Amino acid sequence: MVAVNGWQQRRSIRARARAAELAAAYSHYDAGDLLRVMIEEAFAGDLAIASSFGAEAVALLALAAEIDPAVPVLFLDTGKLFPETVAYRDDVVAHLGLTDVRVVAPDILDVAAVDTSGDLWSRQAGACCYLRKVVPLVQAVTPFSAWVTGRKRYQGDGRRALAPIEASDGWVKINPLAAWTKQDVFGLIARRGLPKHPLLAQGYLSIGCQPCTRPVTALEDERDGRWAGQDKTECGIHTLERPTGTSGSARNINQPHPQP
Ligand code: SF4
């Protein structure tokens, strides 16, 4: 975990208290109702949705758009995405009528300093995710008290105990689909006629950056196609871990938690 200072500690204490209070009141709500309470009441104007616009993302975005199409949606463009994902994002935005999709990208000076040759992913995937995902995401969510993710318990070991509402590094994090099954997700996509990610048909069931994603077979879990052959299973945006060996030369790498 990144080093914390007094401001971060106070923010973390507040987030933990708020998350506990909200969890006691709303954890039993279904996904749509939980999202509605969070967007319209608990964090009105103070919440964003983080979306990869991956294989399943459209389900959560459809629920959110139904409540408020102007809710801020943060799209992390690492510079290493499949072109199909960027095109799909535009299709989904148009289909759902989302009006506040914010493209979040790594600082070009940080990339120039830390990933000069653009292949950091092949040598230090943890450092690459930190540079291209964690730091820009932290900066993007800093103005908000809460953010929403599309994670589900069925997605693997690290997510099996996922709570609908949790505190994480100073934010309240809402996971409305935590208890959903894959059938729930694709059932909603089918019922509503939502656009499907074009790479789904090629066996990509969990879609991240192009160099670190491959299709999976019927015998594999969907996330087996992410960082295949490595111990790495998460990009770090949900733990904010700073990988060992990360270069300290980039400005944002040294200041992952900007203060207000
Ligand atoms: S998923 Fe791969 S390319 Fe994308 S930020 Fe992480 S290591 Fe880099």
Image (tube, rainbow, N blue to C red):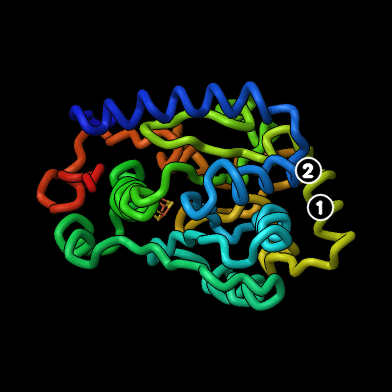
Badges 2 and 1: C-beta atoms under 8 Å apart?
Answer: yes
**Coordinates of residue 21 in the picture (x, y in percent):** 55, 24
Say which of 240 and 147 sits in front: 147
Quarter residue 201 falls in? bottom right
Asked whether residue 56 is in view, the answer is no
At mark 2, the secondary structure is helix
Q: Is residue 77 above or below residue 25?
A: below
Q: Amino acid at mark 1?
A: Phe
**Coordinates of residue 175 in the picture (x, y in percent):** 61, 38
Task: For label 1, count other residues whose C-alpha is less than 10 Å away and answer few (under 14), some (14-19) or many (20+).
Answer: some
Asked whether residue 54 is in view, the answer is yes
Q: Residue at x 51, y 61 (%)?
A: 72
Instruction: List the residue tagged with mark 2.
Output: 182
Q: Amino acid at mark 2?
A: Lys
At mark 1, the secondary structure is helix
Per the rendering, the mark at residue 186 is 1
